[in-house]
Amino acid sequence: MSANLSPNTSGQFNPSEMMDQAAYYALAKSKKPTSMVIGLAVMAGVFIGIAFIFYITVTTGNAQTGWGISRFAGGLAFSLGLILVVIGGGELFTSSVLSAIAVANKQISFGKMLGIWGKVYIGNFIGATLLLALVVSAGMYQNDGGQWGLNALNIAQHKLHHQPLEAFALGILCNLLVCLAVWLTFCSTNMLTKAIMVILPVAMFVSSGFEHCVANMFMVPLGIAIQQLAPPEFWLAVGASPEQYADLNIINFITANLIPVTLGNIVGGAGLVGLGYWTIFSRPQLNAVPTSQITPLFTDSDTKEITEMNANKTVNQFMDINAYVLRPEMPVEVALDNLLERHLSGAIVINSHNEVVGFFSEHDVLVELWCEDYLPEKGRTVADLMKADITSISPKDTLLQLAEFYAIDKPTLYPTTDMGYATSYSTLSVNDRARDMRIAKPRILPVIEDNKFVGIVTRGDVVSQLRSIYGERMEVVKTQEEEIEAVVA
């Protein structure tokens, strides 16, 4: 069971569980390497630009259609952009501001969050610019006798005529809806449901004229390009002149639109939606891992007859009660040094109440280094990297149960449905399938009693307890080994 996502396995989540999904979504953005973030941001910039092309096409030549109906149709068309981002994969600045949740949860630093925003913002701008070059090169502004380009010019010019406070407020309203659209996608794991969820919020913000900084990265420069590059034939066909759109320039775009709209988008998305929901559903950090998130290995029905060994030996008879543990607030470098000095690959993390809160391993460190391009952020703690998906055992569990757990994976060995129907067939015997099986099981298991950490059992402990099945160690073997060593020497 993944601790990153809610333990709910139905694929449908209530508002409280959606907050958990959002927290994972926010933290996941910090785990991606820079090259991936920028690449996905470029794609998102292209996707939003495509959506605006669709909007312009749908709303061009609709003079006889009611103002609201025409804009609503354009809003529906524009929703394609966010659908592409959500389903196709993309890093959009206006939804990336939800990474503020990870800062509130103390999972990443404020500087790390700003770094994510900066990478995504730049990537979005690159993507929008690339699409703009293609659209202008294709001469799309001449569609419908130039009316397509005229529509684009009017839209771009209108965006520069807002007062700074108006642009800021329109930016807040826009990203309130965009982030709510993204938030709604956390209600389900079904891709079609996610796509449907984003349509109406996006259609509302577009049809109402709210301002989206990434969309404007494409739309306003498109107007500027048409004003600068369109041939005289275009202006003659639409009955206008370049002078009418002289205010379409880079300076006006940045100062009158992009800066206030971007700030408004941050407030609307990070503040009203992200931190708003976080305030409502926030929980104390570093609590014990919920019971539903700690997977007990065995039930009372997990038994097997055996006569060649002591099947009644229980975990409390051989567990390590003095196992080395970590604290969540411990700096990563200190934790790593302690693991290396003790020749440990990982350790259980417990809080001040002796409750298990996670597991920290060398693998977590390697993943973090890879995600950070081997330039780790300073100040990271064990809590930032540890995994909270825990498989636990009880002091009353038996040695035999643990041996079986490490030896086989029952769903793989006996592939059947809940009704008992086989899902795959093999000519190999059960024993042969068991010997060929490749499984991954946690090497270190925390022992939990009454929700408190009482010790650990490792795979080596289990093997050590089973060693007696082979009989006593034979001295002759030792002698032969010594003879071999002597000959080699």
Image (cartoon, rainbow, N blue to C red):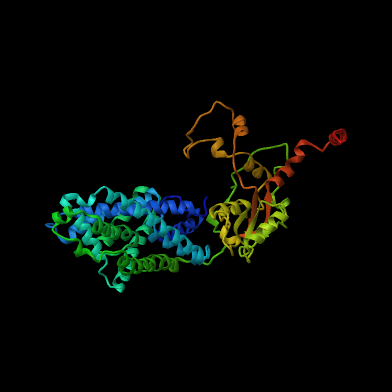
Q: Residue furthest top?
A: 427
In the rendered image, residue 176, in percent from the top left (x then y), is placed at 34, 65
Residue at the image position 18 percent from the left and 58 percent from the top:
69
**Observer-nearest of 74 and 454:** 74
**Image quarter of residue 170:** bottom left
Image coordinates of residue 483 in percent, x first then y, are 87, 34
Residue located farthest toward the left when viewing the structure as drawn = 64
Q: Nearer the viewer, residue 331 or 461?
A: 331
Left-right relation of 125 to 374: left
- Left or right of 380? Residue 398 is right
Residue 26 against residue 400 in the figure, above or below: below
Q: Would you say residue 323 is visible in this rendering?
A: yes
- Residue 276 vs residue 136, the one in the foreground: 136
Quarter where residue 302 is shown? top right
What quarter of the picture does the C terminus occupy?
A: top right
Q: Residue at x 14, y 55 (%)?
A: 236
Asked whether, in this view, residue 390 is left or right of residue 99, the answer is right
